[in-house]
Amino acid sequence: MNLAQLLVRAARVHPDRPAVLLGDQPQLTYRELAARTARLAGHLRDGLGLQPGDRVAIYMSNHVAYLEVLYAAWWAGLVVVPVNAKLHPREVEFILGDAGAAVLFVSDDLAVDLQPLLGSLPALRQVHTPGEPAYETALAAPALAPTHRTPDDLAWLFYTSGTTGRPKGVMQTHRNLYAMTSCYFIDVDEVHAGDAIVYAAPMSHGAGLYNFAFVARAARHIVPLSGGFDPAELVALSRSVGRLCLFAAPTMVKRLVEHIAASGASADGFKTLVYGGGPMYVEDIQAALSTMGPRFVQIYGQGESPMTITALARETLDDRRHPRWAERIASVGVAQTLVEVRVAGPDGQTLPSGETGEVVVRGEAVMAGYWHNPEATRQALRDGWLWTGDMGAIDTDGYLTLKDRSKDVIISGGSNIYPREVEEVLLRHPGVREVSVIGQPDPEWGEVVVAVVAGTAVTAEALDDLCLEHIARFKRPKRYHFVAELPKNNYGKVLKTALRDMLHQGEPPC
């Protein structure tokens, strides 16, 4: 049940189909991709003497070699450790050391800064940079036959963002990732030979995980010339390549929609945009549907259950005649087919429909645990359920609406306030481009609500009036900060920790 069998089958059945493109220019067919993968796998196993289960780290920007490196590791029976290309070298050093990575693949744009730290990693045997002579030599090794792996063997060791201390290594097995791929076909989208997934988001994360569905159908994989997200470039690719599919953070979707609306470009070349990884506000998805049509699917997942907790189908997003359409498009959809999802209280008991509690999930896609961290594993996996740390409520039809991370809930005067509810109201003001609501310690109330707003021609008084019109008085922000832009990570998620630090440093509120 080795994931590499997806590529083996695609190359055998459809050898001449284009596999990898750089921009709109084909680079490799499936026959060529599989051949390069087999030879690179031979170098890893026979040339370096790695054994099944050894770890191979990939610290690369989006690159045409990314897929062959991924599949070579699995082909050789090894474990992939994908590393966020935006991390500081010291953070990368920790991940490589914790994982005990034996080999590192690093793109040339990242290699120089990392080089001084590699001597501190005793397990590391070799470093390769695609395109350099040593990498080409590795590709000349005798081909290796695919290594057998069992469904529960480790395949993908993904390190969490580490916002609360050291990052943890999430252990995903071959079974987990096959289940995730099955959920893509069942709950997200069908894939046809003429489709093309474009990696506008990092291949080290969710966008890269969706490669499996496209390899399984021997469809096309596009690495943009920019290496990432550029709305004009995506529109151009939609014209020259067509049937584009991509995974994007909500902020990326918003930028693409704004570009298409402003430029008058056609959206016909886009097939499916899957969004997730952060809140998509109602105003934004309504604008997206109006501008681009029914091309959107929402997924909700975590590294611990990647891309596989719930899905909001394009048919639901497009069903404006449904009496609860407005509520449903504010949700993250229903449980995906191969998992169970419920909302639980602190005692683990399932809460009634409509009540808010912690979202818990179990099923074939849920991680095996955290790498070398049994205590964290015990906290996250209880009685077979993954406790996500996200707060939400499920309605009578099974639609899950997320409130916030449990750590982001604001408790003011003994009442729970969910930041997203307040953010949705503030975004109704035409002058508000972005907003993030957080709690700030207060001696009288415990916490008070603070809104950090990016926008133009907007005042605290106008936002106060808007809140008083739509939500309870106790939920409205007590303070407002106006900024040019909200701090975000490279996936477009707002960094609430950075906002809290800003307030803690005493910047004067507006």
Image: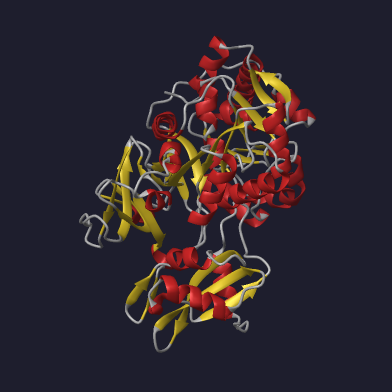
Q: Which quadrant holds residue 248?
A: top right
Residue 314 position (above or below residue 3) = below
The picture places residue 99, in percent across and down from the top left corner, at 52, 45
- Residue 467: where, in percent of width, then height? 46, 74
Residue at the front extreme?
Answer: 321
Query: Residue 191 vs residue 240: left or right?
Result: left
Residue at (25, 61) in percent of width and height:
345
Residue 188 in percent (x, y) is at: 44, 34
State the residue at coordinates (59%, 44%). Answer: 291
What colour scheme was applied to this rendering of the protein? secondary structure
Q: Quadrant of residue 510?
A: bottom right
Q: Is 374 on the left or on the right of 83, as rendered?
A: left
Q: Is residue 64 visible from the viewing direction of this image?
A: no
Closer to us: 332 or 407: 332
Tell me which residue sits at (48%, 66%) in the image. Answer: 425
> Residue 52: in sight, yes or no?
yes
* Residue 123 percent coordinates (x, y): 59, 42
Q: Residue furthest right?
A: 133
Q: Nearer the viewer, residue 75 or 254?
A: 254
Residue drawn at x 39%, y 56% is 402
